[in-house]
């Protein structure tokens, strides 16, 4: 997800600070249910629009909702990491309302979702984080956030949060608290990831849900457990050598590489797939599949609609393995690993075949020879 650009830059609308988008790093990257993604996008847009119009108090209330959403997602992960303890904590907290919590109206297809926790009083819901070691100090600070929000959110006819400075203070406070909340799950989540990825049900290509390692990692882990960018950053730092000697070592390492690759693509604005060793390895001698899957250009569509399918004969090795990425203006050969830029490659004016550009004429040696005979 990224910030929505303002449509009217000529009115000198204040540029929202980066801190206003920080909460997105604690919210999921992939969604099972796209209404959840739309909900978050709408909240983010509301906070941004309020900010741009100087309505800090409203931006603040909307940011609080984004914060609570991130906290609910964290608690949802606790239900996976420590199922029994969390159920006990829920029972203790809800007493006779416990069975309501599991009712159809408060779950999705029989499963808890982040919104399930919204029926619990906001100050009380933090208590569930006791299961992962929340201390009194942080609990007190979290409760204070809710108290403050209550003061600002009441329709008392007063706008109290009127300065950019106060708003920034509140933003930083939320960003600091959410960091400390998710940090509580860090070690458990890393252990859970290592355990999951080492389970044959997850790694064995004959058993697992998706044959493609990227698809398996995205669908069965990143989406399944609503992982955020911050959490993915912890996991991608796990070394491949940690899986040395495991049963299923090769498959496990391929899957972990898929997660590292996912994170890299997510965070690099200037991502160059041709420089990514994972991509080079995955599509070795398979340029056509690279183009189909990574560049999302279909050979079938090209054939039908007359577009060009960007796989060519490599001038270096002669193999039909040279892929062209129009986004980066670069060519890469998936056979010999040779790279070319746009400037180095040209197409013959007479026969259309690929050739190395030379300053004089764009006519290939074969055609030149034929021309001299004519
Ligand atoms: Zn080549
Ligand atoms: Zn030619």
Image: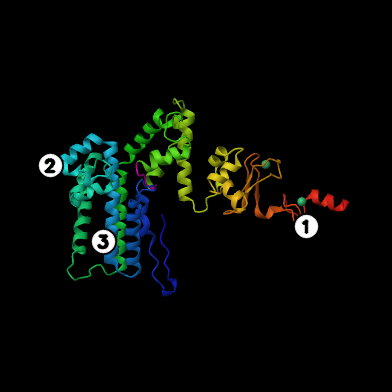
Residue 304 vs 319, above or below: the answer is below
Q: Which residues are magenta?
A: 225-229
Q: How far apart are the two marked residues, 1 and 2, measured between alpha carbons?
A: 83 Å
Disc 3/disc 1 C-alpha distance (Å)? 65 Å
Q: Please state the horizontal and vertical placement of residue 323, each as a whole percent of the image.
A: 62, 46
- Can residue 104 be seen here? yes
Instruction: Farthest residue to the bottom: give it.
Output: 11
Which quarter of the figure is the N terminus placed in? bottom left
Q: CA distance from mark 3 to mark 2?
A: 30 Å
Residue furthest to the left in view is 96
Q: Which mark is residue 361?
A: 1
Q: Position of residue 133 (x, y in %)?
A: 24, 40
Q: Determine the main secondary structure of the stretch shown in magenta.
A: loop
**Residue that appears at 26% across and 61% down:** 61
Q: Badge 3: how crowded within 10 Å, few (<14), some, or many (20+)?
A: some
Disc 3 or 2, which lies upstream in sequence?
3
Please state if 334 lies on the left or on the right of 32 as rendered: right
Which numbered circle lies on residue 95?
Answer: 2
Classify residue 110 by image quadrant. top left
Q: Nearer the N terminus, badge 3 or badge 1?
A: 3
Q: Mark 1 or mark 2, which has the lower sequence index? A: 2
- For residue 226: magenta? yes
Which label number is shown at residue 27? Answer: none
- Tell me if mark 2 has few (under 14), some (14-19) or many (20+) residues whose alpha carbon lies within 10 angstroms of its own: few
Location of residue 118 in the rendering, given as x and y in whole percent from the top left corner: 22, 50
Q: Which element type, helix, strand or loop, lies under badge 1?
A: loop
Q: Which residue is mark 3?
A: 61
């Amino acid at each position: 997800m990224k910030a929505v650009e303002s449509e009217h830059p000529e009115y000198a609308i204040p540029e929202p600070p980066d801190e206003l988008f920080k909460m997105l790093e604690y919210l999921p990257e992939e969604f099972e249910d796209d209404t959840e993604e739309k909900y978050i996008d709408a909240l983010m847009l509301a906070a941004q629009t309020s900010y741009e119009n100087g309505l800090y108090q409203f931006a603040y209330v909307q940011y609080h909702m984004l914060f609570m959403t991130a906290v609910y997602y964290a608690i949802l992960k606790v239900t996976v990491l420590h199922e029994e303890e969390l159920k006990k904590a829920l029972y203790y907290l809800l007493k006779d309302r416990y069975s309501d919590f599991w009712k159809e109206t408060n779950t999705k297809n029989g499963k808890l979702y982040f919104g399930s926790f919204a029926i619990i009083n906001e100050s009380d819901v933090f208590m569930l984080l006791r299961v992962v070691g929340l201390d009194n100090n942080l609990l007190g600070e979290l409760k204070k956030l809710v108290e403050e929000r209550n003061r600002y959110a009441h329709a008392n006819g007063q706008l109290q949060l009127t300065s950019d400075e106060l708003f920034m203070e509140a933003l930083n406070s939320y960003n600091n608290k959410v960091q400390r909340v998710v940090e509580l799950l860090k070690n458990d989540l890393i252990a859970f990831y290592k355990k999951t990825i080492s389970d044959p049900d997850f790694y064995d290509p004959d058993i697992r849900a998706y044959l493609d390692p990227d698809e398996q990692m995205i669908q069965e882990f990143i989406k399944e457990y609503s992982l955020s960018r911050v959490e993915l950053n912890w996991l991608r730092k796990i070394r491949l050598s940690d899986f040395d000697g495991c049963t299923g070592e090769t498959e496990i390492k391929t899957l972990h590489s898929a997660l590292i690759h996912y994170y890299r693509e997510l965070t690099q604005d200037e991502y160059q797939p041709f420089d990514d060793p994972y991509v080079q390895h995955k599509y070795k001698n398979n340029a056509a599949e690279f183009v189909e899957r990574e560049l999302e250009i279909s050979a079938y569509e090209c054939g039908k609609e007359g577009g060009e399918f960007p796989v060519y004969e490599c001038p270096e090795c002669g193999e039909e393995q040279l892929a062209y990425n129009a986004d980066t203006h670069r060519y890469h050969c998936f056979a010999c690993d040779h790279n070319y830029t746009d400037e180095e490659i040209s197409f013959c004016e007479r026969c259309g075949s690929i050739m190395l550009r030379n300053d004089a004429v764009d006519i290939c040696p074969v055609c030149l020879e034929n021309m001299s005979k004519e």
